[in-house]
Image: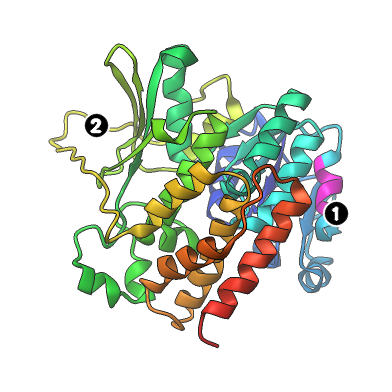
Amino acid sequence: MKNIVLLGSTGSIGRSAADVIARHADRFRAFGLVARTSWRELAAQAERLRPRYCALTDEAAWREARSAMPAGTELLCGLDGVKEIIARAEVEVVLAGITGAAGLPTSLHAVECGKTLALANKESLVMAGCVIMRLAASRGVAILPVDSEHSAIFQCLRSGRAAEVRKLILTASGGPFLNRSAAEIAAATPDQALKHPTWNMGAKITIDSATLFNKALEVIEARWLFGVDVDRIQVVVHPQSIIHSMVEFIDGSTIAQLGRPDMKVPIQLALSYPERLEGAAEPYRFDEPRTFTFSPPDLVRFPGLRLGFEAARAGGTAGAVLNAANEVAVERFLKREIPFPRIAAVVEEVLGRHTLIPTPDVPAILDADRWAREETARCLPR
């Protein structure tokens, strides 16, 4: 029985993880559930999973929820409360399902406490990959990817030694604007951008998929998670979203991981590793006619991916700046305050104004994040 803490339990990743835990109640226990403001959904999850602890990082939501928890579940408040849950000796695995830079402090704390980190919060490595991977190595902590692409690469890498790997190939669906003209993309609305063709995700990640910034973040994540040079990472567009990623080896062979687009598969593997359990999703049917297509990404229509490669090559604080600027720009786009192409344009502007710190510590990373948010706000209309 593994005791698991779900960070961001009411988000899309957290809800899927809760389903996995409920399905395998003989193997997993939800020891702690953490959310920001969605206290009613958190209370419903607590009623279903009966965790020892819940936490809400928003104090107003915590006050509302105090009388809603089932017997036997203690409700804590704020970041200190979350860290207290993570640090409990009973906890073995922390699933980091918080979206954005907000997930960095708890990801760091989980590694500091020696917990296995099932990582869905790619921003933790985008911002502080050099710090987290070094800390994980010193603590002997395993970081298991939950992103479908990185989980696929993690699985494919088991087919050979590190010295036998030529490149990592991340697949991208291409998002809702894959076949749209530059003019159509320029006029894109939030409603259009939120209609992802294959995946059901939260608003921020869905917009990032439309701009290909999601893939930009994944390139930086892969660089740190797998310890490879950026020039050995390739992105290909695969609209069917069946091949989740691939690894090319030096003998010319390529190993791919395939399956239906269902996040329960990588979530369950991260929780059960090194075992595989039954029942995460229906297997793909190869007796059904289907064509798989691949194409290179268009870095002119989708410059966000180009910026991701540039930030990955620069290293240091570049990832934190790219992520922060993008978070601010996406929020403004969702509020219909800026046009769709302005997201990538303002990120590039802010990156161009940033003075890179090549080997930052955590305070320097947080300073870069704060500076980038302020600089992005200055570049956008008020």
What quarter of the picture does the N terminus occupy? top right
Residue corresponding to mark 1: 81
The answer, for residue 336, to whether it is visible in the render is: yes
The image position of residue 328, as x and y in percent, is 56, 70
In this rendering, the answer to whether 95 lies above or below 381 is: above
Q: Is residue 274 left or right of residue 368?
A: left
Dot 1: within a 10 Å radius of its alpha carbon, few (fewer than 14), some, or many (20 or more) residues?
A: some
Q: Does the magenta stretch include residue 84?
A: yes
Label 2, label 1: how far apart the Cα atoms are: 45 Å
The image position of residue 37, as x and y in percent, is 70, 67
Element type at mark 1: helix
In this rendering, the answer to whether 250 lies above or below 30 is: above
Q: In this view, does 242 lie to the left or right of 104?
A: left
Residue corresponding to mark 2: 285
Answer whether labels 2 and 1 touch (C-beta < 8 Å): no
The image position of residue 245, as x and y in percent, is 36, 34
Could you say which is closer to the camera, residue 264 or residue 244?
A: 244
Identity of the residue drawn at 66% across and 50% down = 357
In this rendering, the count of numbered labels is: 2
Could you say which is closer to the camera, residue 102 or residue 234?
A: 234
In this rendering, the answer to whether 253 lies above or below 63 is: above
What quarter of the picture does the C terminus occupy? bottom right
Q: In this view, does 180 lie to the left or right of 174?
A: left
Amino acid type indicated by mark 1: Gly
Element type at mark 2: loop
Q: Give the range drawn in magenta.
A: 81-86
Q: Does the magenta stretch include residue 158?
A: no
Amino acid type indicated by mark 2: Arg
Identity of the residue drawn at 31% across and 56% down = 175
